[in-house]
Image (tube, rainbow, N blue to C red):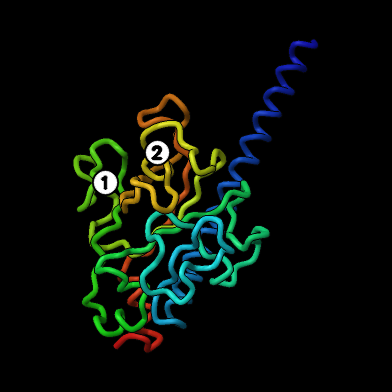
Amino acid sequence: MCRHVSLLLISLMYTLTAASEQRARDDTMRRLAEARELLLAFAVVRGRLPCPAAAGGNGDESPVGGGACTDYYTGFLPGRALGMTGLDASGYALDAWNNRVRYAVSNNPAGNFTSAVALKAAGTATVPGDLVICGSAGGIVTAPPASCGAAASISNQNIVVAVIWSMGKNGGPTAYSGADEAANNKNRLPAVTNNHGVFVWHDARPAGGAGGEYDDLMIWIPVGQLYGRMISAGVLP
């Protein structure tokens, strides 16, 4: 009898844990989707995308006012600049595990997407070429020009203008258990040699799977979506 009760309790605890984890993932995806909408709204109002927030700052874009960003690929979502709620004490946007949400923006051509003057002058002829989403880390090329290389490409090389992602439950500046998470998170801090525009995205995968454990959550902005919003608002011709 006691054995059956123990099994039932273990099963119940597992079910509750799984449900809690799924709620956290759903909530985080909702926050990422909200961030994408706020980034697009920012572009409509300011005529550009914001720079990522730097580590150790106040959750605002760095530098404030855009232009040549302090860092393009390894910064944080500038929650304060976007007017988001649910920020930490320093003004950074958080995921459901209270880890800071990350954000990367295209720097190809240099600074165009974070400069209202440059973006308006170039118009929709400005095409990003430095951010790409790959199906795995196997075969990716991080040295310029970065690409998926032998890995399957989820996005075209010239489509992605911004990436917003959460490092998942195991989040942290060195949170990775295999090659796929490492591509997104390993040493992704300013002024580190792993500063590149290649990202890996696929469904969650437990430890022991190909590419190691993977629980990152990611969303991105295609350049066509950005231009569509800006043209509709009359920001770009």
Q: Camera-side residue: 44 or 186? A: 186
Q: CA distance from mark 1 to mark 2?
A: 12 Å
Instruction: Give SS at disc 2.
Output: helix
SS at mark 1 in the image:
loop
With respect to residue 233, does 39 lie above or below? above
Residue at 34% x, 46% y is: 193
Q: Is residue 195 above or below residue 46?
A: above
The percent coordinates of residue 32 (x first, y second) are 51, 58
Residue 146 percent location from the top left of the image: 23, 50
Does residue 7 lie above or below 194 as drawn? Answer: above
- Which residue type does callout 1 highlight? Thr
Near mark 1 (Cα within 10 A), the count class, few <14, some 14-19 or many ≥20, is some
Residue at image location 33% in from the left, 76% down from the top: 227
Work out whether residue 74 or residue 32 is closer to the camera in this orientation and state it: 74
Front in this rendered view, residue 8 or 57 = 57
On the image, the x and y values in percent for residue 174 come to: 48, 39
Q: Which mark is residue 88?
A: none
The residue under label 2 is 182
97 horizontally vs 9: left or right: left
Say which quadrant the N terminus sits in. top right
On the rendered image, what quadrant is the C terminus found in? Answer: bottom left
Name the residue rendered at 45%, 58% in the picture: 103
Q: Amino acid at mark 2?
A: Ala
Report the residue marked by disc 1. Answer: 142
Splitting the image into 4 quarters, where does residue 105 fall?
A: bottom left
Name which of mark 1 and mark 2 comes first in the sequence: 1
- Name the residue: 36% across, 70% down: 68
